[in-house]
Amino acid sequence: MGGVDYIHDMADPSQLRVSDDEREQLVQELHDHALAGRLTSEELEERVGAAYHATTRADLDALRADLPVSSRSVALALSKRKGQLRRRLVRESGGGLGVAALCVGIWVSNGAGGNFWPAWVIGLALLPVIRDSWRLLGPGSELEVVEARMQARHERRLARGRRYRYRGLPW
């Protein structure tokens, strides 16, 4: 097996190796399908044994190919997607928090007198993150909207970076 062939084989997601957690998740799904009457006890026993011996995603997918998507797998996928978006929001908020800390530091070094003007900077810097956090974690979760807004911000940052590099600026 050559290096290029190995890399090419790994590009196929169905050939990725599965974890014990993924096997257990499938076993739980199979039990749900048996409870719903889609599998007989013999079919369940056979598929559970095959699930515990599965090594790749293709092996697991073959065991659920003739079954509808279970509510458990939908809930798990939704939870995983929300978790990924939450982590991405936390990363995005880091820049806004850095700007906020800098402004508060300047305000404090100038005697911390008068109005707390950094509040305006903090509000403007963190407004997109706060809005997306509410849309993600609030009562009516809007995953597609949050993901699209985050992707648009990411693409704008990339475009700005390309513009600056093109002009020869160091950042």
Image (cartoon, grey):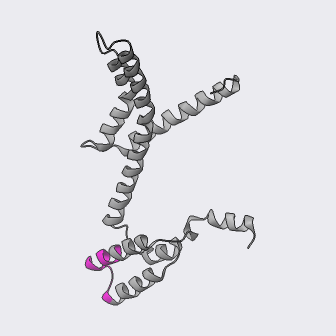
Residue 50 place in picture, x, y as percent: 45, 84
Q: Residue most toward the left?
A: 139
Q: Is residue 106 magenta?
A: no
Q: Is residue 34 magenta?
A: yes
* Quadrant of the snapshot with the C terminus: top right
> Residue, x 35% and y 90% (percent of image)?
42
Residue 33 place in picture, x, y as percent: 31, 76
Magenta region's main secondary structure?
A: helix
Residue 45 place in picture, x, y as percent: 36, 87
* Quadrant of the snapshot with the N terminus: bottom right
> Residue, x 49% and y 35% (percent of image)?
152
> Residue, x 35% and y 84% (percent of image)?
44
Q: In which image quadrant can residue 69 be found?
A: bottom left
Count of numbered circles on the image: 0
Closest to the observer, 159 or 95: 95
Residue 3 place in picture, x, y as percent: 73, 66
Picture layout, residue 24 above or below residue 115: below
Closest to the observer, 11 or 129: 129
Q: Is residue 75 left or right of residue 2?
A: left
Q: Is residue 35 left or right of residue 171?
A: left
Q: Residue most toward the top?
A: 114
Picture layout, residue 78 above or below residue 92: below
Q: Which residues are magenta?
A: 29-41
Closest to the observer, 144 or 67: 144
